[in-house]
Image (cartoon, rainbow, N blue to C red):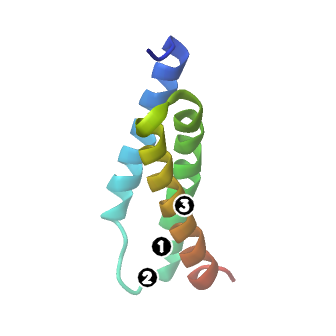
Amino acid sequence: MHTPECQRQLANSVQLITAIKGREKRFAPGNMTKNCELLQQNLTDMVKAREPMDRCLTGREKDDAIGQLDASIKDMKAFYAGSCQP
């Protein structure tokens, strides 16, 4: 059973992830300026979403969620470093 605080923070994490998914539709082929801005926002939101999930989830649910988030964060950081750094 999640505490009320964890339930609230997990709901916020879901909202952040939903916003990330919504932004994915706005990426534009060849527009690296826009794409890098969107990617930076997605990365920021994903890191924010991860913390409560790491703290509040347990067992298999935690392992699955954190594993997926960590892989996505790693991929996004690598892409950003290779394509978006000035």
Residue 75 is left or right of residue 81, and the answer is left
Return the residue at label 3. Answer: 73
* Residue 76: mark in rendering: none
Residue placed furthest toward the bottom: 30
Q: Which mark is residue 31?
A: 2
What residue would you read off at disc 1? 34
* Quadrant placement of the C terminus: bottom right
Residues tagged 3 and 1 counted as in contact (Cβ below 8 A): no
Instruction: Indicate the position of residue 39 as horizontal and vertical percent values.
Output: 50, 66
Res 80 seen here: yes
Marks 3 and 1: which is nearer the front?
3
User: Where in the figure is residue 52, as x and y percent of width and height?
Assistant: 56, 33
Quarter of the image where one finds residue 73: bottom right
Question: Residue at the location (52% across, 42% down)?
Answer: 49
Quick check: marks 1 and 2 in contact, CB under 8 Å? Answer: yes
Residue depicted at x 49% and y 30%: 58
Name the N-terminal-most of marks 3 and 1: 1
Answer above or below: position of 56 versus 43: above
Per the image, label 3 sits on a secondary structure element best described as helix
Residue 1 in percent (x, y) is at 44, 15
Q: Disc 1 to disc 2, how far (Cα)? A: 6 Å
Q: CA distance from mark 3 to mark 1?
A: 19 Å
Assess disc 3: are there few (<14), some (14-19) or many (≥20) residues with their C-alpha within 10 Å of its C-alpha.
Answer: some
Dot 3 and dot 2 residues touching (CB under 8 Å): no
Q: Secondary structure at mark 2?
A: loop
The mark lying in front, picked from 3 and 2, is 3
Disc 1 element: helix
Q: Residue furthest right?
A: 86
Q: Is residue 25 above or below residue 62?
A: below
